[in-house]
Each structure stands twice: as C-alpha cells, then as structure tokens.
Image (spheres, grey):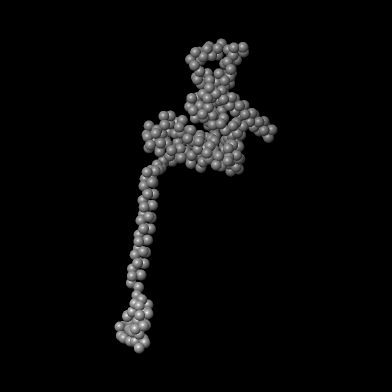
Amino acid sequence: MPFTKIYNLYYIRIYQFVYRHSFSHPDSEDITQEVFMNLHTEINKKNTPNNIKAWLYKCALNKFININKRKKVIHLTDNINQYEKALTNSIEYEVIQNEKKRLISKALSMLSQKEQILLNLYNDDFSYKEISKILEIKFTSVGKTLSRVIDKLAIQIKKSNHEELCRERSII
Amino acid sequence: MKNCVEKEVLFDFYHHSLEKDQMQVIKKHIEECKDCRNLLDLLSKDISLVKDSLNLLNSEIIEIPEFQAPTNNIKEKNKINYIKILSIAASICLLISISTLSILKFTRNQKPVNDYELLVFIPDMNDAWKAQSITVTHYDKDGVLVNHEIIGN
C-alpha cells in the first residue's frame, strides 16, 4: 500500500486514539505527525511492517507514554478540568456534551492507564491477538481483562448517569 | 443456573473468539437458557454503551494536514556535516600559512636600525692591540665617510 493511502486512512484514527488519552490537540497532532514520520522512514528503509495498523498504534502508544513520562502527567483526571473551563462560554448543546464527556472521562479515570489503553484498542476494532501483541500481555488474558474492564466502566457510567438524573430532578 | 456460561466466556462468545466446538456448545445452551440469553443481551448493551461513550470523547472533525516528508536523509545530512568540517579546516590552514609567510617576509626585509656600520673589524683584538694597528672608519647611511681613526700609534 502506498504511503499516502496509509496516511489518509489512518491519520484520523491515530489522532483520535491519542486524543482520547491526552485530551490535548497539540500533543495529539505532534504524536500523530511523528508516528507517520517514523513510518515514512521505515518504508524508505524498506522495512515496511507486516501489520501496519498495529505498528502505527504501538508507535503512537509508546510516544504518548514517553511524553507523559517527561511531563510527569499520567492520569486523565488532570485533563477533566478542560471541560469545566469550556462550560462558561458555550451554547447549550455543547454544555450538555461537555458534561457527558466530563462524566465519561471521570469514569475512565477510575481505571488504570493500561486498562484505558486496552479499552481504546478494543474500541478501534483490534483483535485479541493484535491487542496482546501491542500491549505485550498474554493472549488468554485479553478477553478476561476486557470483560472485567467493560463491566467496571459500564457500571461507573450508569452510576454517573443516574447521579446526574437525580441531581437534575432535585434542581427542578 | 447450574450449567450456565461464565460472563467472561460469554464475552468471548460475543466476539466469536472461541474455538468452533465451544462456540456451538454455548450457542446451543443460550438457545435453551433464558438467563444466559438475558446476560448476553445485557453484555451487548454494556459493550455498545461503553463504545458509544468512548467515541463521544473523540475530538470534533479533524482535517488531515498534508504530510511533509523529511527532505534530508541521514546520509545527506552527514555529507553536509563532512563538507562543513572540511571547509572550516581548510580555512584555518589557509589562515596559518598566510600569517607565517607574512611574518617571514617581514623579518627578511628588516634593516639594521644603526646609522653607521663598523666596516673593518680585526678578528683578534689582542694581537691588533699589541701591534697597535686598530683602525676605525665610520660612514653615515648615505655612504659618506664620517670618521677615519687609527687607535694607538
């Protein structure tokens, strides 16, 4: 597959994947650009990876982890405030969306970083085999961990939705 | 619920990631067991809830910027560095050679500062003293005789 085709196909996916972890546009843009730069040099060296999609995600993940190590910011909770700031000057729809996002990221922050990455990879339609390769965990434990994590997150989301409903009713 | 399927296995069943025989066994069981059917239904709802929530976190519409390929390869970069170092070394050599040449030329062209020169000088002064035959002649810088003197008798 030629490079430009790969670039157009995966740019947004990689960007969203990084954004869902970092909640920072400049970081996501930088990491995505760097990932494709690396791929470009790999292709020039004629070392084209077998599974390009998995390679791209793994590369993005490593870069994201490295950046976080440098910044010493690891958890999503630090980025939740961003939504609260946006609340002050946005229209009603955006307010509701931001509130939803805030609740979800709060629920996500209850999970460990590895669990969050696992979920995001699952959300991007990776097979168990690919996930186990990217995260370097056992193939057999992928399904078990995933089902546990999804269970946990679903409960958290439902709980926060319920709390939100209760709060709305009490206000009315 | 005695022979019912565990939630984790049901999760794998939902994703078709079990072996064929196992898939068929569970499929058969689900058709018969209402609890397991409900559980599978709940599981699929949970999965779609989680997926929807995660997708909500996605950023707004993103534009794909044009890819700017790195123009200089490593080899070319090395070449440029090599040329830079060579040119610096050459310029230093040139500077040193010019400066040494000019210093040499300056020292060669330098004239004695004295106004007159001692033209006749007898090697053994003691013998000359004994013979009492020391002569001293002075010329100025235009070569005109200034002083001619015989020391002693």
Q: Please say whether residue A55 is visible from this viewpoint.
A: yes
Instruction: Give x and y (percent) for residue A140.
Output: 53, 22
Q: Residue furthest left?
A: B143
Instruction: Give x and y (percent) for residue B9.
Output: 55, 18
* Residue closer to the observer: B138 or A107: B138
Which quarter shows the C terminus of chain A?
Answer: top right
* Residue closer to the observer: A91 or A161: A161
* Residue closer to the observer: B19 or B73: B73
Instruction: Give x and y (percent) for residue A76.
Output: 58, 36
Which quarter shows the N terminus of chain A?
Answer: top left
Q: What residue is rendered at 61% in x and 12% in y?
A: B2
Tally the numbered discs. Answer: 0
Q: What residue is rendered at 30% in x and 83% in y?
A: B143
Residue B133: quarter of image:
bottom left
Q: Residue furthest right?
A: A170
Instruction: Give x and y (percent) for residue A121.
Output: 51, 29
Is B62 above or below relative to B132? Answer: above
Horizontal side of residue B23 vs B86, given as left or right: right
Q: What residue is rendered at 59% in x and 34% in y?
A: A105
Q: Please say whether residue B61 is visible from this viewpoint.
A: no
Horizontal side of residue B30 vs B143, given as left or right: right
Q: What residue is rendered at 43% in x and 41% in y?
A: B65
